[in-house]
Image (spheres, rainbow, N blue to C red):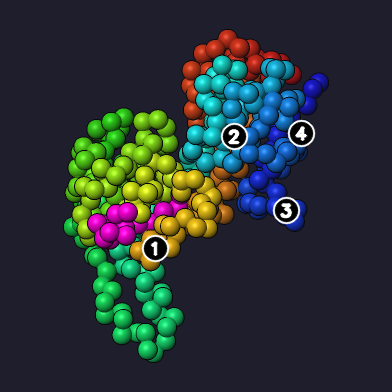
Amino acid sequence: MTAFRVGLSADFTRADGKPTFPSYDLSALGAEGVELVELPRAALLSADHVTGFDAVVLLGERMAASSFPGDGRLALIARMGVGYDTVDTDACTANDVVLTITPDAVRRPMATTQVCLILALTHNLMAKDRIARTGTLGWPARLDWHGMGLVGRTVGSVGVGNIGAEMFRLLKAFDVRMIAHDPYADPAALAALGVEAVSLEAVFEQSDVVTFNCPLNDETRHIGSAAMIARMRPASYLVNTSRGPVVDQKALYDALVEGRIAGAAIDVFDPEPPSAHEPILRLDNVITAPHSLGWTDQMFATMGAVNRGAIQDVRAGRQPANVVNRAVLERAGFRAKLAAMAGR
């Protein structure tokens, strides 16, 4: 019997050999007879890298159409997180490979990240941190940094998916008005959350804080455009924890420098990682994080559990949960792969 082989992202192991994410655990698969093999470290995986594997677990690596091997063995790409712009989904379907993500793992950590950044911005946390470090002479400057209370303020979101809905659930405790633009959202679901559906323009015009909860695709690239940012009010803030390219970074920088908005918090950049000379990194009214603010022990423990479940399902010939390219489930080639798995 051929062993079920899983290729693991090289990002799981640090240069010193220690695990990058100690709480992420797939060891139970090894106990079940699954062979776990670390993939080569590469920004773009080649077909040679993936040949001979039934499944691969990816973090930062890209999978293009050229990445799919000709042996026809690969059945599953288990992507950590919910973003999948690094994987060619059409190529997955064409090669009878199912792509899964881990929405349960990121829902609460990323929603709390957004709330964390909203509070840090509206309370001028970074400015007050700098003042506190100046000692006796600097403390009088705190009089110039009153925050913005959230009661009755408006928080808007571009997109309301898994994370956005959780963000709004958490924000209810702050007595804010909640609005969003998402042409794909169920109006009844938005109403149940207490979220008012509005136009994209209204999100930027009416919000005291604009957040982004949309995937990166052709439709959302630069949806936070110069024209939209120009609609924001001088006392408003922008928070982006989605993907860097959903916001026009140069337009955001210009608005911040010219005082057309009060501040921004960004956990994502365009490109990533940004150059050390990226102008937006030098602004005092910007809070930044290296696309990792939501990383917690609980996030990665749940990611491990979700990825492990997807691998176990495919190995047993079952359809996994959290499928991105659902069209593949109806393809004869993919069904044949599942049937073969079940017969091993």
Q: Nearer the viewer, mark 2 or mark 1?
A: 1
Residue at 52 percent across and 53 percent down: it is 275
> What mark, if any, has residue 283 been given in the picture?
1
Crowding at mark 3 (Cα within 10 Å: few <14, some 14-19, many 20+): few
Between discs 3 and 1, the one toward the N terminus: 3
Residue 264 inside the magenta-drawn segment: yes
Mark 4 vs mark 3, CA separation in Å: 22 Å
Tell me if label 4 and label 3 are in contact, CB under 8 Å.
no
- Write down the quadrant of residue 215 in the picture: top left
Residue denoted by label 2: 62
Distance of label 2 from label 1 (alpha carbons): 32 Å
Answer with mark 2 or mark 1, whichever residue precedes in sequence. 2
Q: Give the labeled residue for mark 3.
A: 15
Q: Which residues are magenta?
A: 254-268
| Helix, strand or loop under label 3 | loop
Q: Bin the neighbour count of mark 1 within 10 Å (Cα to Cα): few under 14, some 14-19, many 20 and up.
A: some
State the CA–CA distance, disc 3 to disc 2: 20 Å
Q: Residue furthest top?
A: 332
Q: Is residue 137 above or below residue 285?
A: below
The answer to which image quadrant residue 161 occupies is top left
